[in-house]
């Protein structure tokens, strides 16, 4: 017996209708084009509760581990991350990595419980002797004690098999079988994904360390620290300083640097360590490469300022109007491509590059896109739900209210070599604030000044204030 046909209506203009007929959207059985809309019909076979729970859905990925110790150490690195709290250690903890399979890569992502550290383990097809990437998909599970105990017993030369399904993951070894089932994904993690991809997009390469130099540097990280550490990666004798070195360049400043001790689980397998940093916020990205797998550690600018969905994410928002049909088709294309650059998505969808960039920003705001800084590409996650538009950061909502009240007075607005430069006044709750900004050609807020208390205290380290956002949106819409 079949369920009744479910009808979905998507209002789409003629150009999109033609595109939809040339490139069918995923999971559709019938597309009927009409003048102004496309009707999509989906049918599903009725299954028993037992069938729906257990059956008959093939695995998303399955494969024999080629290097069990590397697999073990990277997953233990994730476990150490989710168990860690570097700010308010008295509060709760969450243990639920998100696992994504696609384009011959298996990715496991998580945050520390204080959300100031992001960790991701990427396994290429070379990490498995017979890895089978059956289809793209995402799930999230809780690493409980039984699974971790099983993981800790992995040894070289002993067969071990890993399988990922829609509702669970499974690890088989001579010690038996451990299964972890899907758990609910916290909304704050999706907001964290938004902030992490924004940070990684802006992070610039600083240096690459060989195994010996990286090991010497990480082994000397103190167990706890207050303020900034200055890491100077000299080849024969790396230095850790507590004051900014004289001169410019050749070092990286990391606030709450003891968070880097999470990389020590990867040291036995490390080949190279690549380091990136965002100058504006002090956030950094550390990519430990083992050859067949990479472990990425992202540190927010400070442990007290976690990846919360604002900050750098707010610095790339634009006042762009996006056609919902274009957005839906780009979503389908991102699902199909799985990994891509903005230029590749623009070519695939036949869209101008600036407009494709705005669409990518919108998909990233919903948590659907991550960014792989090491490969310089976006990747797609198939999330169980999207962030509600009404749950946007308060500063973004505040900027919209200021615009509605016509509280922005622009004194200067010019575009030069693709950059936007603007200044003016914004009427806030406590008076007028003088505001000025510069947005680069890629749509990223590079400079911003405001006389409000938020910017006076944090500058741009925690993202723009609502007054800067309101000025930017007004200037982008100005003739």
Image (cartoon, rainbow, N blue to C red):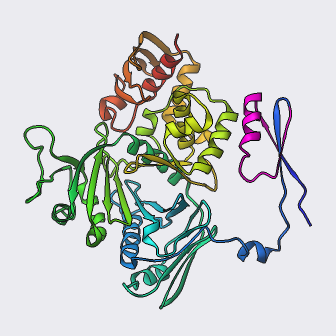
Q: Measured along the vertical axis of the image, is residue 38 above or below residue 352?
A: below
**Number of labelled discs?**
0
The residue positioned 42% from the left and 88% from the top of the image is 158
Say whether residue 31 is magenta.
Answer: yes
63 vs 54, nearest the viewer: 63
The residue positioned 77% from the left and 75% from the top of the image is 51
**Quadrant (top left/top right/bottom left/bottom right) for the N terminus:** bottom right
User: In this orientation, does residue 311 appear?
Assistant: no
The residue positioned 55% from the left and 20% from the top of the image is 403
Residue 114, image quadrant: bottom left
212 vs 203, nearest the viewer: 212
Q: Measured along the vertical axis of the image, is residue 459 above or below residue 376?
A: above
Q: Residue 268's x, y, as percent?
A: 26, 73
In the figure, is residue 246 to the left or right of 283? left
Residue 18, image quadrant: top right
Q: Measured along the vertical axis of the image, is residue 157 above or below residue 16?
A: below
Say whether residue 98 is magenta.
Answer: no
Q: Residue 310's x, y, as percent?
A: 45, 40
Q: Residue 135's x, y, as percent?
A: 62, 62
In the figure, is residue 32 to the left or right of 162? right
Q: Residue 387's x, y, as percent?
A: 59, 46
In the figure, is residue 217 to the left or right of 277? left
User: In this orientation, does residue 41 appear?
Assistant: yes
Q: Which residues are magenta?
A: 8-34
């Amino acid at each position: 017996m079949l369920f009744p046909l479910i009808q979905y209506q998507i209002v789409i203009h003629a150009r999109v209708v033609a595109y939809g007929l040339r490139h069918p959207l995923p999971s559709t059985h019938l597309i009927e084009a009409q003048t102004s809309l496309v009707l999509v019909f989906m049918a599903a076979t009725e299954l028993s509760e037992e069938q729906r729970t257990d059956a008959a859905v093939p695995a998303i990925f399955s494969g024999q581990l080629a290097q069990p110790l590397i697999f073990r150490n990277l997953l233990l690195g994730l476990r150490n991350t989710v168990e860690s709290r570097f700010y308010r250690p008295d509060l709760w903890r969450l243990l639920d990595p998100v696992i994504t399979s696609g384009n011959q890569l298996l990715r496991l992502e998580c945050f520390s419980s204080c959300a100031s550290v992001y960790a991701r383990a990427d396994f290429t097809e070379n990490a498995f002797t017979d890895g089978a990437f059956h289809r793209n998909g995402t799930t999230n599970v809780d690493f409980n004690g039984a699974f971790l105990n099983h993981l800790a017993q992995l040894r070289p030369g002993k067969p071990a098999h890993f399988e990922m399904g829609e509702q669970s993951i499974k690890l088989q070894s001579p010690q038996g079988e451990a299964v972890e089932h899907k758990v609910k994904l916290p909304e704050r993690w999706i907001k964290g994904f938004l902030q992490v991809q924004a940070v990684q997009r802006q992070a610039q390469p600083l240096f690459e360390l060989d195994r010996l130099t990286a090991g010497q540097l990480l082994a000397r990280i103190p167990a706890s620290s207050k303020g900034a550490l200055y890491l100077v990666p000299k080849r024969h004798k790396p230095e850790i300083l507590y004051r900014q070195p004289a001169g410019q360049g050749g070092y990286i400043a990391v606030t709450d640097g003891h968070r880097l001790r999470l990389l020590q689980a990867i040291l036995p397998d490390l080949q190279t360590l690549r380091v990136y940093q965002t100058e504006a916020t002090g956030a950094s990205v550390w990519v430990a490469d083992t050859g067949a797998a990479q472990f990425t550690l992202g540190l927010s600018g400070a442990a007290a300022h976690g990846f919360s969905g604002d900050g750098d994410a707010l610095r790339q928002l634009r006042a762009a109007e996006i056609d919902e049909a274009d957005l839906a088709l780009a979503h389908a294309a991102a699902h199909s491509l799985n990994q891509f650059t903005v230029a590749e998505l623009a070519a695939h969808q036949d869209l101008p590059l600036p407009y494709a960039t705005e669409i990518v920003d919108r998909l990233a705001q919903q948590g659907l896109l991550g960014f792989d800084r090491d490969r310089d590409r976006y990747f797609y996650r198939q999330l169980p739900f999207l962030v509600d538009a009404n749950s946007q950061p308060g500063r973004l909502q505040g900027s919209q209210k200021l615009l509605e009240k016509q509280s922005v007075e622009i004194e200067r607005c010019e575009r030069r070599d693709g950059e936007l430069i603007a200044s003016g006044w914004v009427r806030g709750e406590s008076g007028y604030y003088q505001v000025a900004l510069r947005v680069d050609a890629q749509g990223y807020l590079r400079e911003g000044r405001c006389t409000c208390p938020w910017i006076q205290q944090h500058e741009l380290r925690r993202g723009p204030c609502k007054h800067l956002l309101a000025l930017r949106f007004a200037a982008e819409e100005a003739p």
